Image (cartoon, rainbow, N blue to C red):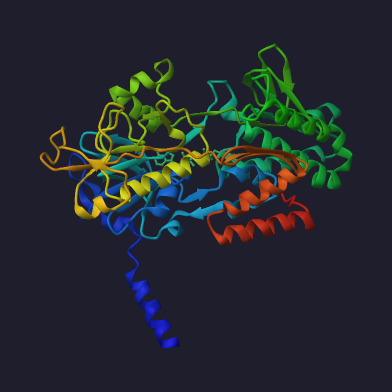
Amino acid sequence: SAEDIGRHLNRAVKELPSTKALDKLVKGGGKDGQGLRLQSEKPVVLLLGAGWGAHSIMKVIDTDTYEVVCVSPRNYFLFTPMLPSTAVGTVEFRSLLEPVRTANPFVDYLEANCDRIDLENKVAYCTSKNAYLDGRRPKFEVPYDILVVAVGEQPATFGTPGVKEHCFFMKEIPDSVGLRQRIQQQFELAALPGTAEEDLEQVLHFVVVGGGPTGVEFAGTLSDFLREDLKKKYPELMKHVRVTLLNSAQTILNQFDSKMQQHALDNFKRVGVEVRTGVRVTEVTKDTIMLKNGEQLKYGVCVWSAGNAPRPLVQQLAEQIPEQAQFQPGGKPSKLAVDPFLRVVGARDMIAIGDCSLMVGDRLPATAQVAGQQGAYVAHMVNRGYLPLLGGLDQPPPCKPVDAAALATDNVGTMGSTLEDGEGEGAALLYYKKPFQFLNLGMLAYVGDDRALTEIMLPFTKIKLSGQFAYLVWKSVYITKQVSFRNRVLILFDWLKAQVFGRDLSNF
Ligand code: FAD
């Protein structure tokens, strides 16, 4: 009856926990005791990040047993594989976002950056992303029992002068929003009366640096926008438009085999994207790209998608933990080395997943697929009550104290003897024997003009497809991979809207 429904709803609302994590922040943090710190009776699992890895944990982790706190400067999960589509308006950017607070309302979210970790006392020091009224950014501390570092990476510039100042990246929503506006601005600028021919060549030259999946997908998507929408509105300008893809390696999309790479190159030739391989950018000024061979390219918009670099927090942690040194290439801290249970080597109760981690002995690709699977693995492990303890290849696996119920589960654990490090001495242990294993489901890349490359892994074979059918697979996979039904519907409508009315050309 309506009355019953009303009663149930009321109860459900009352039973929802307070999602204001700030309520749990109490005075008494910091050396002087004047800061804020988190107060909780349950063991605290602290997640750093709200991307593929952390989001996958949030969906599965047991919030009845653990106080789960997520600290991240952005309060949403972003479906990155479709980010290039938002830069030209094939898909609206809000269709790719999932607010953290809806992923799991029982996870406490704090919009902040984690600046540093006190490894000994197990405390994370954080700073709010936004300023308070008096212009100060609040700082707070979160003591944790288990820390999961899932902060991803940031775009790498390789120290190339001018990249930060003059190029667009393709990493976050603000990058894509800014780029979409800039593409449109270039066309409006070129359409002004009296613009010299040679200026038009420069203003309408779009350069993409990086021949990996992101650079290739953006170049393909941009060529669609030019041919399908801008050509109709600015027909007289089209003869001045150029799209160039620069790559320092000799091939593009080196994750795919040479036949698939050739398919991408042939497609680019057909749609008018000029691909230049074996060229290295040495400097970018406001209107010129300098190449190592001395050549200078005049450009209007440059998109830099040439790889990733570590976040400052990860560099700092890798430097803080002496056992990490042997795993850092050239002695430069880059990723957190983790053991097969994803525990950070040399650190206590710390797990690292996704792009910011490197599994020793099994070099996994830095992809959403890996990060998502690692997140689910960690959540299941934590839900079963396993303690990471000290990470390292020569350390015993994660364990939990034995009880009859645990033995009855399918945890593939075996009886151990006692804890050797003194913690819980004398207690029998159940060791966790199941290291993380990546299940490769395949790869996808859009190359423009409704064509894609797909490689789908089946138990004993892989299916390779290229062309328009592969694009249908690309679309189907990404629609089914959306986290929410809402976003599935929004994306389908965005595709339909772009097909029927064309992409929006507003300069906003
Ligand atoms: P991220 O998803 O990057 O999340 C990191 C999180 O940490 C963010 O929420 C960030 O705000 C937060 N953070 C940063 N610093 C701090 C800090 N100091 N404290 C707290 N939080 C912090 N992969 C595929 O498998 N297939 C694809 O088709 C594909 N396409 C891609 C297209 C683009 C344009 C991009 C950019 C990436 C693509 N990837 C793809 C790669 C994939 O997105 C990454 O591998 C994946 O995001 C890694 O997940 P993560 O959880 O490690 O990091």
User: Image point 44% across, 88% down: which residue?
Assistant: 1
**Going 72% across and 17% down the picture, which residue do you hit?**
296
Q: Position of residue 497 (x, y in %)?
A: 73, 58
Q: Residue furthest top?
A: 293
Q: Position of residue 139 (x, y in %)?
A: 31, 44
Where does residue 352 sit, x and y in percent of width and height? 37, 36
Q: Residue at x 73, y 58 (%)?
A: 496
Left or right: 41, with 3 as reference point = left
Towards the viewer: 480 or 42: 480
| Front in this rendered view, residue 326 or 90 | 326
Left or right? Give the position of 372 relative to 61. Answer: right
**Numbered label tally:** 0
User: 472 above or below 419?
Assistant: below
Q: Quadrant of residue 213?
A: top right
Of residues 258 and 47, the one drawn nearer to the viewer in this rendering: 258
* Foreground residue among 467 and 8: 467
Q: Residue furthest right?
A: 236
- Rendered view: 405 above or below 356: below
Residue 138 in sight here: no
Q: Residue furthest left?
A: 426
Taking the spot 35% from the left edge, 31% from the top edge, the residue there is: 339
In the image: residue 271, left or right of residue 363 = right
Decide if residue 394 is in sight here.
yes
What x and y, as percent, mark residue 463?
66, 39
